[in-house]
Structures are given as C-alpha cells and as structure tokens.
Image (tube, grey):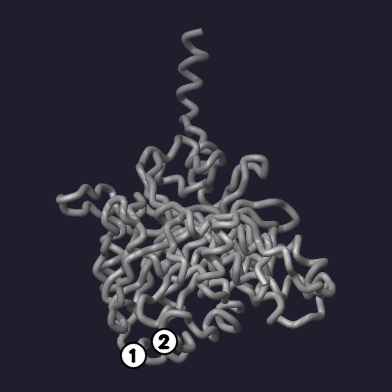
C-alpha cells in the first residue's frame, strides 16, 4: 500500500518526465495505481495497521546520512548498529530504495578501456579530525579504468608536488604503470587546454610521464565527467572510509588506515558495473601494466637561494646554515614532502636539514662556519721594527 512518502517520490519522478510504467516498477505497484494516485493527488487512505519497526528510532540518523551523500546500505547499517540497531539489513534497504529515485542524477558517458591502458586521477577534500583538531584533508584518487581497483593518498595540499607524489604512490601500490594517465585540467598537470588547440602540459608533469613511461591525457574542457569512474570513487571514499573512520592520530595514521581499508574492503567488493570482485579483475590486469622505473622520480619542491654573508639561507621564515665557501653564491634547494631540506651547489649535496619553525630558532651545523671563524680570528702579524719607527718619529 502506498504512503505519503511514496506519493512524494511519485510526484518528483513525474515532474522529471519519468514514464508512469517506470515509476510503477520503481515502487513495485501497477501502472494504473500510479495514474489513479496522481489524479487523486493523495495516497490511498486505506492502510494496514502497522506495528512499530526496529528501524523507527534510527530513521532520523539514516535520513541525515542520506542527506550527506551516504547511500551505501552496508555503511549505513554499520552506523546504526553502533547506535543499538539489531534488526536485519533487508528492512534498511526497503526503507532506502524508494528514496534512491530522488538522489541527484550523475549521467555520464561510459568509456571502457583495455587492461593496463588507463589510470584516471582526481582530487577530493573534506574536513576530519587529526590529532584532536579539525583538519582540511585533500586526497588524490587514482583508479585503474579496467579493473576499477583504486588507491588514494591523503595530504594537506593539492599542488603539483603532492599530485606527482600521489601518482607515484599509486603506481607503487599497483606495482606497475598504465599506458596513459587521464587528469583534470588542474595546473599541476595542464597549463592550457582550449577547444581545438593542443594541450599544454606542465613541464614537470611531462618529466614524470617520461620517467614512468605513460602518455599524459587531459579531459576535454568543461567535460571533466569523462573521468566519471574516478569521480565516483571520490564519493565512495567520502561515504565509506571517512564514515567508518572519523578520528586519526596523525597523517601517517590516516594513510595507514587508508591502505588497510583498501586491502580489506575496497579490493574485495563486487563492482556494480563489471559484476566482478575488484581484486580478481585486477589479477588479470596487473601483468599488462608497464614496469616501474629503476629510480624514483624526485617530487620535492625546487627553488634557488642566494647565500648571505654569514653563510645562511632563508627558507620558509627560518634560516639554515650552508658551508662558508658558498657565501655570495646561488644554490638550489629541494624540500621533500616530509619536511627535509636539501641544499645543492651544482649537482653536489652540501647541506641537509630538517625544516623547523622560525620560533625554534636558526638551524646551524658548526662545521659549516669553521672556516669563517678561523678567518675572523686571524690577526695580522707585524714586525717589531714597525713599532720602533713609530716611537722614533714621535
């Protein structure tokens, strides 16, 4: 028997142009029932007297999760079980199913690719708790288009260096490289992409592609949904991983749990489109992936600095020592994503520091300044007859 909630769904679908026969199939009733109910404008008044459901105390939380974009019934079931629900998942699915028709549409053109052909890359972000504080988390999602196996890595930035690091970590997780990588038109990878003109890729992204042997590809302008597979994974991670885990001790703890969740849950799921266990489909794709390079690509930040007269360089608000013989020269600095500062004179590594805040004080290696101190302490030696001359004339 239809209720008021079914009537609301019915009206919404009718307004969107859905055929009555399809609405009837969605709600599990005869098409004539849909027609009569819409003409009457209200749900049938005769209803069976229903007993209370175990789900009733939890419907408010279910509706809240649905409004936040969490539609995975298994995830919702786990959440309400934590609040004391001891019923079956069937009741929950019966409650959710009519509401799915009101879920915002995500129509895209589907592109199927061969094993090992393509990896799709995209970024997502949300706010969660890290070390007891609300923190904005960016996460890069890299998905194999054939097997649908994916990897994601969380960081505090979506810049070029973190984009390259995320791709490399995914290649290492898959133990291989696809023939091409499809990215959105973010500046980390694409500098210019206009309709009818060649794509201008970021030079360092081209270096990365050359190092790992893949062909870079960019979505058509205003058609980012050509990466639909990967965009769905962004939502899947938000609605599953970040619903199960809401509090992390550190960034390292966050990424550790992410890889654990990938192995234990995401890889074992049966994909709704290909109807296969993702890990089993990946087992066929992995041999088609290209090999990893013998040398890992350096994703660190690269800048130059002028060495001051006191043999220090300034980096991010603090000062760090370098060997004294480099005073006045230009050096190249590289900052790893884990906060290690390396200083190069040409191709030679001359200093290595761990980044510190300005409040922690300057960072000094005594050996860097030993030559300067010796030079400062040297006193000019004069013969005694110089002083004798002075006393004679006086």
The reply to whether residue 249 is visible in this rendering is no
| Closer-to-camera residue (120/225) | 225
> Residue visible at 59% across and 81% down?
265
Q: Quadrant of residue 119?
A: bottom left
Characterize the local packing of mark 2: few (<14), some (14-19) or many (20 or more) Cα atoms within 10 angstroms: many
Camera-nearest label, 2 or 1: 2
| Closer-to-camera residue (366/351) | 351
> Residue visible at 29% across and 78% down?
113
The quadrant of the image that shows the N terminus is: bottom right
Q: Secondary structure at mark 1?
A: helix
Q: Is residue 58 left or right of residue 121?
A: right
The answer to whether residue 269 is above or below residue 381 is below
Characterize the local packing of mark 1: few (<14), some (14-19) or many (20 or more) Cα atoms within 10 angstroms: few
The reply to whether residue 387 is visible in this rendering is yes
| Closer-to-camera residue (218/102) | 102
Place of residue 216 in the rendered image (x, y in percent of width and height, measured from the top left): 26, 64
Q: CA distance from mark 2 to mark 1?
A: 9 Å
Q: Secondary structure at mark 2?
A: helix
Place of residue 243 in the rendered image (x, y in percent of width and height, measured from the top left): 66, 66
Q: Quadrant of residue 162?
A: bottom left
Place of residue 91 in the rendered image (x, y in percent of width and height, measured from the top left): 71, 78
Q: Is residue 227 left or right of residue 94?
A: left
| Closer-to-camera residue (303/374) | 303
> Residue visible at 54% across and 75% down?
30
Which mark, by number, is residue 237? none
Q: According to the image, label 2 marks what residue?
A: 282
Which mark, by number, is residue 287? 1
Q: Is residue 355 left or right of residue 311?
A: right
Q: Tag count in the figure?
A: 2
> Residue visible at 35% across and 80% down?
146
Q: Quadrant of residue 248?
A: bottom right
> Which badge, 2 or 1, is on the more N-terminal residue?
2
């Amino acid at each position: 028997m239809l209720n008021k909630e079914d009537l609301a769904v019915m009206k919404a679908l009718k307004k969107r142009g859905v055929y009555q026969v399809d609405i009837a199939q969605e709600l599990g009733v005869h098409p004539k029932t849909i027609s009569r109910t819409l003409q009457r404008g209200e749900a049938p008044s005769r209803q069976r007297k229903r007993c209370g459901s175990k789900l009733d105390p939890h419907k408010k939380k279910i509706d809240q999760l649905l409004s936040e974009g969490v539609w995975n019934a298994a995830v919702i079931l786990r959440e309400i079980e934590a609040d004391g629900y001891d019923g079956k998942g069937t009741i929950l699915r019966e409650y959710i199913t009519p509401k799915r028709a009101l879920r915002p549409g995500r129509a895209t053109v589907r592109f199927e690719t061969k094993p090992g052909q393509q990896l799709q890359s995209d970024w997502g972000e949300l706010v969660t708790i890290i070390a007891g504080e609300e923190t904005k988390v960016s996460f890069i999602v890299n998905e194999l288009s054939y097997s649908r196996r994916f990897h994601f890595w969380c960081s505090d930035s979506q810049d070029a260096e973190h984009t390259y690091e995320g791709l490399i970590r995914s290649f290492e997780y898959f133990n291989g490289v696809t023939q091409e990588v499809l990215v959105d038109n973010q500046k980390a990878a694409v500098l210019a992409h206009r309709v009818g003109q060649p794509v201008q890729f970021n030079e360092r992204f081209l270096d990365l592609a050359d190092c790992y042997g893949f062909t870079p590809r960019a979505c058509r302008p205003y058609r980012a949904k050509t990466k639909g597979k990967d965009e769905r994974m962004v939502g899947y991670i938000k609605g599953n991983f970040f619903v199960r885990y809401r509090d992390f001790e550190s960034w390292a703890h966050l990424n550790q749990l992410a890889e654990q969740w990938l192995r234990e849950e995401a890889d074992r799921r049966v994909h709704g489109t290909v109807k296969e266990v993702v890990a089993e489909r990946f087992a066929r794709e992995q041999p088609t992936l290209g090999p990893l390079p013998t040398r890992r690509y350096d994703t660190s930040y690269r800048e130059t600095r002028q060495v001051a007269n006191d043999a220090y360089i300034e980096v991010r608000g603090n000062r760090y020592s370098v060997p004294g013989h480099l005073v006045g020269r230009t050096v190249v600095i590289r900052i790893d994503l884990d906060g290690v500062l390396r200083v190069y004179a040409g191709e030679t590594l001359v200093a290595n520091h761990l980044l510190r805040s300005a409040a922690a004080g300057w960072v000094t290696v005594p050996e860097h300044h030993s030559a300067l101190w010796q030079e400062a302490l040297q006193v000019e030696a004069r013969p005694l007859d110089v002083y004798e001359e002075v006393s004679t004339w006086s």
